[in-house]
Amino acid sequence: MGLSTLLALCLSAPVSAGDVGTTVKAFGEPLAGSPQPDAAGSRQLEESDWIAEPFDAVLLQGEGAEPASQFQVARADAAGNWSPWIDARPKRFPGRRFWAKAVFPDARPGRLRVRVNGPASMVRFFAIETFRSAEREDPSIARPRNMTPPPPELTAPEPELYDRAAWGAKPPREEYSIHVPEKFTQHHTAGKYTSTLQESLAEIRFIQDFHQTGRGWSDVGYHYLVDGAGRIFRGRPIDARGAHVRGFNEGNIGISLLGNYHPPYDDAMTPAQREAVRRLGAWLRDRYGIQPSVLRGHRDYNPRTDCPGDLTYALLPELRRAIEATPGPIMAALRRLRLERLPGIFSEPAR
């Protein structure tokens, strides 16, 4: 969808929530993995650390759920009193991917327990998050902006990618709000790592449903998603404000790696993914004047998240340097001219 089409949309449309969740942890690390047998004949994850941010909604996502698997959650108050178990209704996808959501009657801080009844031997959770189900992002940040981006002359084309039709995107549930890109943020999806095209297409469809139906957002929150083979997939149109960094979505382009790059999963960023992020960053620099120095990790904006994972976050300085070192379109054209047509003019002086 181009800028002219997006400008025709109503700018006063409701704003979708963005980055509203708190990552649930146990002993300081994300609560994830496979549940273990308990005395009641079910399987449970270990009890979570104290969650200080009041919540009523719990989102679980993982893989391995059988049709007969049932998910439940319970919440404890500061005195250690546990609520009754409530159902987290699962939604199942190809490849045994699932997400499940539970909503308590009210929002309050507490500890969390998660259990699985029925077949659970192969279930593993990638991530669990809590949030207020009614929370919406403040629409006051949708302030009027200069909607004219820099001229495209002498700008390298956008890196080759799979568009929304290629991965089977559903339409947004609400009209997009328009913005002009001015910074970008690195994420990971904290979900399944993929490397084959078919796995990646299925996982992105899962993520869109998880964001639209589970979190209640208008669309997938990111602008770009990158799989382990370095393939780039379009999420939201670049001229549409995303839902990936709460309170800082205006002008912020979200780039997310498919997978979980944090303990206990520790997926490693591949050279192909680094190259894809470099190409995206260089294009954003040349097209919109976004400097590599403004590349941030999600956790730089939100201390409640580990995103983009320790392994990716440690590579951000290297990514900034790689983007900075990428020749701009004019220098690249001169280099091609030097190599193809006028090698003598641009040759190194004799020593």
Image (cartoon, rainbow, N blue to C red):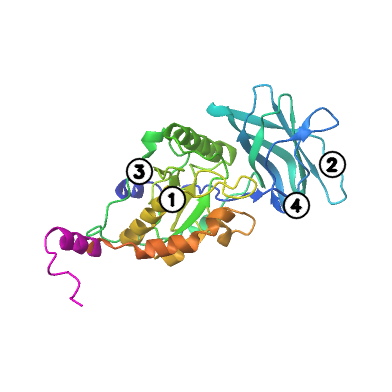
Residue in view at x 31 percent, y 61 percent: 286
Q: What element carries label 2?
A: loop
Report the amino acid beneath label 3: Leu
In this rendering, the label closer to the viewer, 4 or 3: 4
User: Residue 188, how many percent across, how many down?
Assistant: 53, 49
* SS for dot 4: loop
The residue under label 2 is which amino acid type? Answer: Trp
Distance CA(mark 2)–CA(mark 4): 19 Å
Residue bearing mark 3: 161
Q: Earlier in the sequence, mark 2 or mark 3?
A: 2
Asked which secondary structure carries label 3, the reply is loop
Segment tinted magenta in the rendering? 331-351
**Magenta span includes 153:** no
Q: Are the two marked residues, 2 and 3, in contact with CB atoms closer than 8 angstroms?
A: no
| Real-space Cα separation, disc 4 to disc 3, in angstroms | 39 Å
Question: Alpha-carbon neighbours of circle 4 within 10 Å: few (<14), some, or many (≥20)?
Answer: few
Q: Which of 221 and 256 is in front in this view?
A: 256
x%, y% of residue 104?
Answer: 73, 40
Q: Which quadrant is the N terminus positioned in?
A: top left
**Quarter-of-image position of residue 344:** bottom left
Judged from this view, the residue extending furthest toward the top is 68
* Residue drawn at the location 18% of the way across and 75% of the way down: 349
Q: How far apart are the alpha carbons under marks 2 and 3?
A: 48 Å
Residue 335 magenta: yes
Q: Which of marks 1 and 3 is in front?
A: 1
Label pair 4/1, CB-CB below 8 angstroms: no
Query: Label 4 vs label 1: CA separation?
Result: 32 Å
Q: Give me the disc on residue 271.
A: 1
Query: Residue type at mark 4?
Result: Phe
